[in-house]
Amino acid sequence: MLVVDAASTPSGHGALPGADIGTLLARHGVTVEVVSLSSEGSDVADVVLNWMFDHDADLLVMGAYGHSRAREWVLGGATRSILDRMTVPVLMSH
């Protein structure tokens, strides 16, 4: 499991973002390793797609989250960027 620019927030991401879903998946028999990366100013979609290429991943499962149209237009969004440049099948959940 890859988490990019993880930050604990009051809105409920927990002390270690990714740990809760990793624990849930592990309870269902899925071997999970949570990897946290910093984008270091790069586009998050590029970080994700590069990591997937480096690890020979053949499926991306990700949550989809939308922002206001104005914010998406100005700042862009990882969901839209992944959809625009996906190199493997993508399963999204919102």
Image (cartoon, helix red, strand yellow):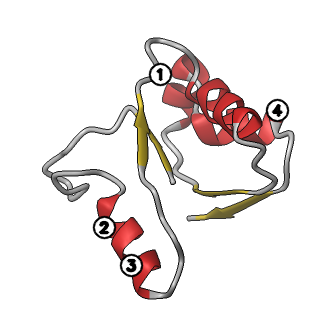
Whether residues under marks 2 and 4 lie with C-beta atoms below 8 angstroms apart, the answer is no
Q: Label 2: few (<14), some or many (≥20) within 10 Å?
A: few
Element under disc 3: helix
Point out which mark residue 24 bears. Answer: 3
Instruction: Give the distance between the C-alpha atoms of the residues marked 2 and 4, in whole angstroms.
Output: 28 Å
Q: Label 3: few (<14), some or many (≥20) within 10 Å?
A: few
The amino acid marked with disc number 3 is Leu
Element under disc 2: helix
Element under disc 1: loop
* Image coords of residue 88 (percent x, y): 85, 48
Tell me which residue sits at (59%, 35%) in the image: 78
* Image coords of residue 39 (percent x, y): 47, 21
Element under disc 4: helix
Tell me which residue sits at (16%, 52%) in the image: 15
Q: Which residue is mark 1?
A: 39
* Image coords of residue 56 (percent x, y): 78, 44
The amino acid marked with disc number 2 is Asp
Tell me which residue sits at (64%, 34%) in the image: 51
Q: How many labels, in total? A: 4
The amino acid marked with disc number 1 is Ser
Picture quadrant where residue 35 is located: top left
Whether residues under marks 3 and 2 lie with C-beta atoms below 8 angstroms apart, the answer is yes
Between 28 and 49, the one nearer to me in the picture: 28
Judged by depth in the image, the label closer to the viewer, 1 or 4, is 1
Picture quadrant where residue 13 is located: bottom left
Instruction: Give the distance between the C-alpha atoms of the residues marked 4 and 3, in whole angstroms.
Output: 29 Å
The amino acid marked with disc number 4 is Arg
Instruction: Give the distance between the C-alpha atoms of the residues marked 3 and 1, in whole angstroms.
Output: 26 Å
Point out which mark residue 85 bears. Answer: 4
Whether residues under marks 1 and 4 lie with C-beta atoms below 8 angstroms apart, the answer is no
Instruction: Give the distance between the C-alpha atoms of the residues marked 1 and 4, in whole angstroms.
Output: 17 Å
